[in-house]
Amino acid sequence: MCSILSELYNIIHDRVDRRVRGSYTVQLVEKGKEYIARKVGEEAIEVVIASLAESRERIIDEIADLMYHLMVLMAVSDISLDDVCRELERRRR
């Protein structure tokens, strides 16, 4: 896995824990888990739309947005990247 994912997750988790003022991550958290879950759905739809009609760069941009919002949802749900990696490893067998 690329190290930026771990780094980003750690930044998100830190901002959630410390409630860094002015942070978009904190704004999401303050709106609640349901709001974050809806954002994940919205971003997933944007990935689908981009993949059907837009450039490779736009698809990458939308995937990055989706991954960020998934990590925010993971952080507020107390789910780590290691938890997800273990599940993926289990499924590989």
Image (cartoon, rainbow, N blue to C red):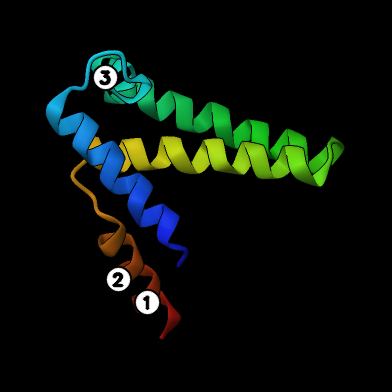
- Which residue position is annotated with label 3? 32
Rounded to the nearest whole Å, what is the CA distance between mark 2 and mark 1?
A: 5 Å
Instruction: Name the mark on residue 27.
Output: none
Q: Tag 2 or tag 3, which sits nearer the N-term?
A: 3
Residue found at the far left of this picture: 18
- What's the residue at 44%, 24% (across, down)? 38
Q: Quick check: 47 above or below 22?
A: below
Secondary structure state at the residue bearing disc 3: loop
Residue type, mark 3 in image = Gly
Crowding near the residue tagged with mark 3, few <14, some 14–19, many ≥20 C-alpha atoms within 10 Å: few
Residue type, mark 1 in image = Glu
Which is nearer the eye, 74 or 16? 16
- Quarter containing the N terminus: bottom left
Rounded to the nearest whole Å, what is the CA distance between mark 3 and mark 2?
A: 27 Å
Instruction: Measuring from the top left, give residue 67's x and y in whole percent.
Output: 48, 44
Instruction: Measuring from the top left, give residue 30's x and y in whole percent.
Output: 24, 15
Q: Quick check: 30 above or below 14?
A: above
- Which residue position is annotated with label 1? 89
Secondary structure state at the residue bearing disc 1: helix
Residue type, mark 2 in image = Arg
